[in-house]
Image (tube, rainbow, N blue to C red):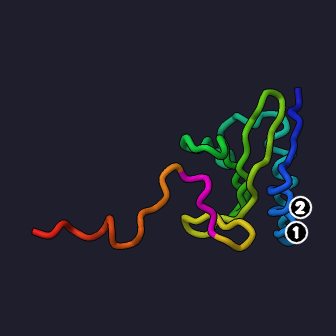
Amino acid sequence: MPYRISITSDAERQLRHLSAREQRIVETAILARLENQPKTLSKSVKQLRANPLAEFELRVGDLRALYNVEGDEVVILIVGRKVGNTLVVEGEEFHGHQDHPTEPPGDATQPDAP
């Protein structure tokens, strides 16, 4: 049974922020990999650590789509690009998927004074 695929208005806007070629790549990957087995983990489908936003991540080169599976529906929530360890969404660094935001530089790396 194929899953219905829907995309939030935010994710649709984020997708349109990509080039036409990248949009086609992401759309093709979503249909090919998520329509029938969106929960089957693979090299391109990863389950994310517990966070308030999304349960799964679809990886297509450096492009990412974060999504949830709700019954028989796949809901695409975020579309962006992975740059190093950072997810960039609409040209901005995205932190909304992390359960613990990074501490300011210097706080965690400074040794305690004697």
**Which residue occupies 80% across, 38% down?**
74
Residue 93 position by quadrant: bottom right
| Relative to 57, 7 lies left or right | right
> Does the magenta stretch mainly form a helix, a strand or a loop?
loop
Residue 26 position by quadrant: bottom right
**Which residue occupies 86% across, 54% down?**
9
Image quarter (top left, top right, bottom left or bottom right) of the C terminus:
bottom left
Q: At which x and y percent is residue 60? A: 73, 57
Q: At which x and y percent is residue 49? A: 54, 43
Q: Is residue 37 magenta?
A: no
**Which residue occupies 83% across, 50% down?**
8
**Which residue occupies 77% across, 32% down?**
70
Which amino acid lies under the numbered mark 1 shown in the image of this protein?
A: Arg
| Relative to 66, 25 lies left or right | right
Where disc 1 sits, the SS reads helix
Check disc 1: other Cα within 10 Å, few if <14, some if 14-19, many if 20+: few
Gap between marks 1 and 2 measured at Cα:
5 Å
Residue for badge 1 = 21
Where disc 2 sits, the SS reads helix
Image quarter (top left, top right, bottom left or bottom right) of the N terminus:
top right
The span picked out in magenta is 93-98
- How many marks do you count on the picture? 2
Q: Which of 29 and 77 lies nearest the eye of the viewer?
A: 77
Q: At which x and y percent is residue 106? A: 34, 72
Check disc 2: other Cα within 10 Å, few if <14, some if 14-19, many if 20+: few
Which disc, if any, is residue 92? Answer: none
| Callout 1–callout 2 Cβ contact below 8 Å | yes
Which disc, if any, is residue 24? Answer: 2
Which amino acid lies under the numbered mark 2 shown in the image of this protein?
A: Arg
